[in-house]
Amino acid sequence: MNRVSTNFEQHIILDGSGNPSLVEDAPAIRPALLALSELRVEYDSDTKALWTHMVPSGRPSFTPSMLCDFERWQDLIQASFGPDDLRYLVLGSHAPGVFCYGGDLALFRELIIAGNRSALVDYGHRCCRILHRNINALGLPMLTIGMVQGDALGGGLEALLSFDFIIAEESATFGLPEIMFGLFPGMGAHAFLSRQLGSVEAERLVTSGKTLSANEMLELGLVHDVVPDGTAEEAVQSFILKNDRRHAGLLGSRRATKRNWNLSLSELTDITEIWADTALRLTERDLKLMGRLADKQRRTSSARKVEPA
């Protein structure tokens, strides 16, 4: 796909050795930000937008290695950009047909079988810290945009709910399937959805296990725009250009909304501990279903990777 902005890749490029090359008017971006293993990062100095795409090495989910990249990504963004250097942060995915499948189900299954509560809690707390920092835009005056091309399930949907705006392609799907194997989404879904939909509707969505289309999410007010397949990047670029003059107002409005949410990190981590305790009570049947879902998602993502261009 051609970039929406013709000079998008001129601001930061990688040379033949994989080393970053910066243009003169770009901020002092830490080279490590452009060398993450499972996140591809580019900066557009014209719009002051940082575009990031997940490039998972295996199943497109939040594996420990992916979480490590997200933690470093956030630290390096804070270290690289001043308050005048970054106005938009965009997250998408290069996994074919998938934004993110969410939590690392194979890892969860291993930890549950081993009765390793501390490792489950540690994983959940790491996710919560990443989401809470994203909610607060890393302390920078920027707007965050989730760009969805494909499936956003479980923790993938939870992650998106921490963004200011979500732009999705028509074929994108969303869901919280954890209830299928006796669990619930434990890294933010209740907190985000209860504030946006009310507690009754949030509980209904969390416990339904339903898969929702992009247009259904738009009707709920959880997605902000739905665009034709193959046009998400163009739509995000258009959103950025259209709202450039309104940036301060949108930023202030989002800050006011988040202030009203009053969502603390401790609330998120407390829910995660309930999630971990619930996980340790899953039955053998539940664990088999969890394993089957992980295998199905792995096979699906592998099949999509070998599809002809």
Image (spheres, rainbow, N blue to C red):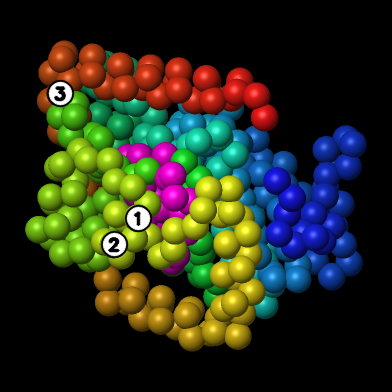
Question: 265 or 7, which is in the foreground?
Answer: 7
Q: Residue tagged by mark 2?
A: 219
Residue type pointed to by label 3:
Leu
| Residue lying at 47% horizontally and 80% vertically, measured from the top left | 250
Residue 165 magenta-highlighted: yes
Q: Residue tagged by mark 3?
A: 282
Q: Residue tagged by mark 1?
A: 215
Bin the neighbour count of mark 3 within 10 Å (Cα to Cα): few under 14, some 14-19, many 20 and up. Answer: some
Discs 1/3, front: 1
Residue type pointed to by label 2:
Glu
- How far across and down, in percent of the image, does residue 204 sit? 13, 50
Question: 124 or 253, which is in the foreground?
Answer: 253
Bin the neighbour count of mark 1 within 10 Å (Cα to Cα): few under 14, some 14-19, many 20 and up. Answer: many
- Say what secondary structure mark 3 lies in: loop
Where on the picture, by quarter, is residue 259? Answer: bottom left
Give the distance between the C-alpha atoms of the residues marked 1 and 3, in whole angstroms: 34 Å
Instruction: Magenta stretch: give its range.
Output: 151-172
> Which mark identifies residue 135?
none
Discs 2/3, front: 2
Where on the picture, by quarter, is residue 231? Answer: bottom right
Residue 216, placed above or below residue 173: below
Q: Are marks 2 and 1 in contact (CB under 8 Å)?
A: yes
- Say what secondary structure mark 1 lies in: helix
Q: Is residue 206 found left or right of 65 in the rendered image?
A: left
